[in-house]
Image (cartoon, rainbow, N blue to C red):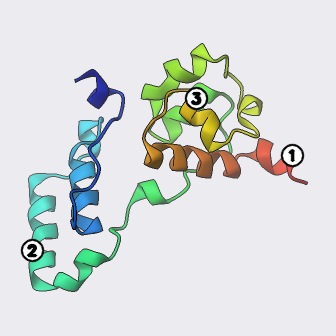
Amino acid sequence: MERVDDGFRLPSPMNCPQAVHELMLKCWDKDRRLRPSFQDILVTIGQWIESPEVLHQPMPSRSNQVPDTRSTTSVKEWLNEIKMSSYMPHFAAAGYEQLTDLAGLLDNDLKDLGISLVGHRNKMLRTIRSLPITQENNV
């Protein structure tokens, strides 16, 4: 259970449409308030039955969007904004506290922190690139 609490999720089953796997992941959201209701799941599956071609299109997801982190000032706030606060101990143990500490982080750095899920690393890297500190450093 600890790995699930830390954000571990099984990879998509072989030949599973992306939309189905995304729905599965939403059902396992750590914050139960963000999970789809049973009615939402029924509606989604009903749409798949009526239009099977949508199974091969990514579902609209907040996780694909870059959260607005302009007012974020600390690593803790940033992780809360991107719904990945379970990784706070990883960053704290490595001494990452301020947003400026994140500038220049790469995928391998996140792996070294113990963030094993590629989707989580990608989301973190995507949002790090959108932070004002990295934009200032790239000018």
Q: Mark 2 vs mark 1: which is more N-terminal?
A: 2
Residue 100, position in %: x, y? 77, 32
Dot 2 surroundings within 10 Å: few (below 14), some, or many (20 or more)? few
x 11%, y 84%: residue: 50
Residue 85, position in %: x, y? 46, 29
- Quadrant in which the N terminus is drawn: top left
For disc 2, the marked residue is 46
For disc 1, the marked residue is 137
- Depth check, mark 3 against mark 1: the one in front is 3
Asked if marks 2 and 3 touch (Cβ < 8 Å), the reply is: no
Q: Is residue 92 above or below residue 74?
A: above
Residue 136, position in %: x, y? 86, 47
Q: Secondary structure at mark 2?
A: helix
Label 2, label 3: how far apart the Cα atoms are = 42 Å
Dot 3 surroundings within 10 Å: few (below 14), some, or many (20 or more)? few
For disc 3, the marked residue is 112
- Quadrant in which the C terminus is drawn: bottom right
Q: Mark 3 vs mark 1: which is more N-terminal?
A: 3
Asked if marks 2 and 1 touch (Cβ < 8 Å), the reply is: no
- For the image, the number of numbered tags is 3
